[in-house]
């Protein structure tokens, strides 16, 4: 079997620290499971700007296009805050997602039993929570034209962004979400604002059509985004898969993140369309940012990035057994009482990024 090509882009701040722990697991997979990854590493975000004068160099993008999967840490930090808009670290992230055609962002929100107390919601509301938010990633308000800030004849300034979706854009994200729901608990909630925004009237119509024509075995419901936000904190377990446009998904997935207690626990996957062989371009990354407040202190929780690697094994490489091993190692280590600062609780042992990474590898060792 040819080695799986994995491009690693640690990025900035804690992105670099958590990725060190993922590298341990990749090495472990090679040594103990005989899984050979062809791993290369590149720059993105502020660290790429410092070297190349751009947050995503063309060569890095070419490497990403040639890889079977890309694993990314996080980008950004105060050092680069004053750069012009197009040079900002976050532009590198938007560009790589856009160029790779990663239109589906999968954000699981899972409450581990050991962390049920970490949520700000009552344990009986979140215990056993396992939902998947599917966010459209390459269209909508974040990319629509026209956009910009202009000066009007009367001297006022006007800011413009445009919410736009075509039927094919809605259908491809709809299919991705229905397919996922079909493999889970067969319930899809489509989130829109069809009472106010025409673009999302079209969204709802297309979801209904897809449901009728291709996915009648999956239950489909529609919620307005304001209600969806309320329901997420009122009774989140009513959901299985939620699908929504780019900006709504950005906000709702962060809201769902907090149901689980910490950004440091949340992985994500971004997938493109399948090619003729069934392979998809794919990028895996933790949901959190570069956390400048704790960067360089060996304090970051590496589990979101480690769980992102687990998603990579599951969705890009069909390595379900290895992905399950990682997920179980995380569960066991948490049940054993180890905690990084972000998920610390009374009576638990506070550990560093490094110690948490080592503990996961030790658990993997026990499983073989
Ligand atoms: P952030 O996610 O970096 O941090 C928010 C808070 O959560 C901070 O207090 C941080 O210490 C904590 N936190 C985040 N991840 C953690 C982890 N793994 N372990 C422990 N604590 C963790 O968000 P922010 O502060 O709004 O943004 C900081 C920088 O990151 C900005 O430059 C922003 O643009 C960038 N950012 C990047 C991404 C990305 O790369 N995908 C996402 C969000 C923000």
Image (tube, rainbow, N blue to C red):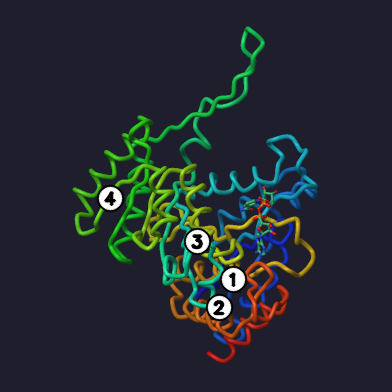
Find disc 2 in the rendering and name its residue. Answer: 330
Q: Label 3: state its secondary structure.
A: helix
User: Quick one: label 2 or label 3, which is nearer the N terminus?
Assistant: 3
Find disc 3 in the rendering and name its residue. Answer: 259
User: Quick one: label 4 or label 2, which is nearer the N terminus?
Assistant: 4
Q: Which mark identifies residue 306?
A: 1
Find disc 4 in the rendering and name its residue. Answer: 221
Q: Do the residues labelled 1 and 4 touch (CB within 8 Å)?
A: no
User: Quick one: label 1 or label 4, which is nearer the N terminus?
Assistant: 4
Residue 225 x/y as whole percent? 40, 43
Left or right placement of residue 142 versus residue 46 in this view: left
Q: Label 2: state its secondary structure.
A: helix
Q: Label 4: state its secondary structure.
A: strand
Mark 1 to mark 3: distance in Å? 20 Å
User: Quick one: label 2 or label 1, which is nearer the N terminus?
Assistant: 1
Residue 296 x/y as whole percent? 79, 64
Residue 268 x/y as whole percent? 52, 60
Nearer mark to the viewer, of 2 and 3: 3
């Amino acid at each position: 079997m040819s080695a799986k090509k994995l491009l690693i882009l640690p990025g900035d701040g804690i992105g670099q620290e958590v990725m060190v722990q993922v590298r341990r697991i990749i090495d472990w997979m090679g040594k103990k499971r005989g899984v050979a990854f062809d791993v290369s590493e590149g720059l993105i975000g502020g660290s790429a700007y410092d070297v190349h004068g751009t947050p995503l160099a063309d060569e890095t993008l070419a490497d990403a296009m040639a890889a079977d999967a890309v694993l990314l840490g996080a980008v950004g930090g105060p050092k680069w805050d004053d750069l012009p808009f197009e040079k900002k670290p976050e532009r590198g992230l938007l560009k790589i997602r856009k160029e790779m055609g990663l239109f589906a962002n999968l954000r699981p929100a899972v409450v581990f039993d050991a962390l049920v107390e970490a949520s700000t919601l009552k344990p009986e509301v979140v215990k056993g929570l396992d939902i998947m938010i599917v966010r459209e990633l390459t269209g909508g308000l974040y990319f629509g034209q026209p956009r910009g800030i202009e000066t009007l004849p009367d001297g006022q300034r006007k800011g413009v962004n445009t919410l736009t979706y075509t039927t094919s854009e809605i259908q491809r994200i709809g299919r991705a979400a229905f397919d996922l729901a079909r493999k889970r608990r067969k319930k899809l909630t489509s989130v829109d604002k069809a009472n106010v925004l025409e673009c999302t009237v079209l969204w709802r119509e297309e979801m209904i059509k897809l449901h009728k024509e291709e996915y009648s075995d999956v239950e489909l419901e529609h919620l307005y985004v304001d209600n969806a936000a309320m329901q997420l904190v009122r009774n989140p377990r009513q959901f299985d898969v939620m699908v929504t446009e780019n900006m709504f998904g950005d906000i709702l997935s962060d809201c769902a993140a907090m149901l689980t207690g910490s950004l440091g626990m949340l992985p994500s996957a971004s997938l493109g369309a399948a090619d003729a062989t069934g392979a998809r371009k794919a990028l895996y990354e933790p949901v959190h940012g570069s956390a400048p407040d704790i960067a360089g202190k060996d304090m970051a929780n590496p589990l979101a990035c480690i769980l992102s690697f687990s998603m990579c094994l599951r969705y890009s490489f069909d390595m379900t057994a290895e992905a399950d091993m990682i997920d179980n190692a995380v569960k066991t280590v948490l049940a054993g009482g180890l905690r990084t600062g972000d998920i610390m609780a009374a009576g638990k042992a506070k550990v560093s990024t490094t110690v948490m990474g080592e503990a996961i590898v030790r658990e993997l060792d026990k499983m073989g």
